[in-house]
Amino acid sequence: MIQRSSDREAIEAEIDRIRSLGLDDLRALWRTTFRSSPPKGLTKDLVARFICWHIQEQAFGGLDPQIAKVLDGFARNGKPPDRRLKAGTVLVREYQGERHTVTAVPGGYVWRENTYASLSTIARAITGTAWNGPRFFGLRTRRSHSGVPAERLASDRDRPTRRNGSRSSAKAQP
């Protein structure tokens, strides 16, 4: 949407005016704008920011629905959302001596001239067992319970294990 510069200047002037208001005036403006009282814990700065955001949202539009969905998912899960690979991205994984090449396409992923909806389906076809596809292709790292990245744990695999499965600090005997 193209905004005339006079509209933009008027909005900037209103924002400047709002920033100059005291807390009592901001609370009164909040009640007029949102038809409710502002939350008690909000500082003067936050009350002003919310009102200014609302003015800009009304003038220029709100968040894009896709961005809002991503942010909502992030807020609910507490972790960054999974990102889709761009079409044309090629993933290569060697498994049991065989090289597997997967290409991301708009409808999913192509492996051995067939299109699959998910990387996990391809990982299962390759290994014969259930795998997290992004992890199998190296897009995610697995963390242990101690927070140590899986790559570090993988480097410890050549160390001998005790009978109970824990790692030994002793060197392997020839």
Image (cartoon, helix red, strand yellow):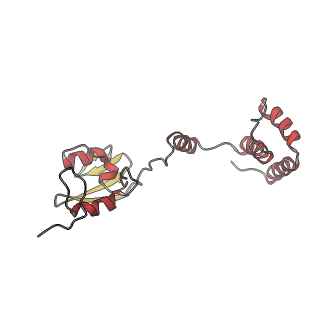
Residue 134 place in picture, x, y as percent = 34, 51
Residue sticking out furthest to the bottom: 174
Residue 20 place in picture, x, y as percent = 88, 50
Is residue 165 left or right of 135 when viewed as pictured? left
Residue sticking out furthest to the left: 174
Q: Nearer the viewer, residue 82 or 102?
A: 82
How many marks the image carries: the answer is 0
| Quarter of the figure with the C terminus | bottom left
Q: Which of 91 and 50 is in front in this view?
A: 50
Name the residue: 55% across, 40% down. 72
Quadrant in which residue 97 is drawn: bottom left
Is residue 149 left or right of 174 when viewed as pictured? right
Is residue 83 left or right of 40 when viewed as pictured? left
Name the residue: 57% across, 41% down. 65
Name the residue: 75% across, 50% down. 3
Residue 147 place in picture, x, y as percent = 40, 54
Up the image or down, 38 lies above or below 121; here it is above
Name the residue: 81% across, 52% down. 12
Is residue 41 left or right of 99 when viewed as pictured? right
Residue 168 place in picture, x, y as percent = 23, 60
Q: Nearer the viewer, residue 138 or 10?
A: 138
Quadrant in which residue 95 is drawn: bottom left
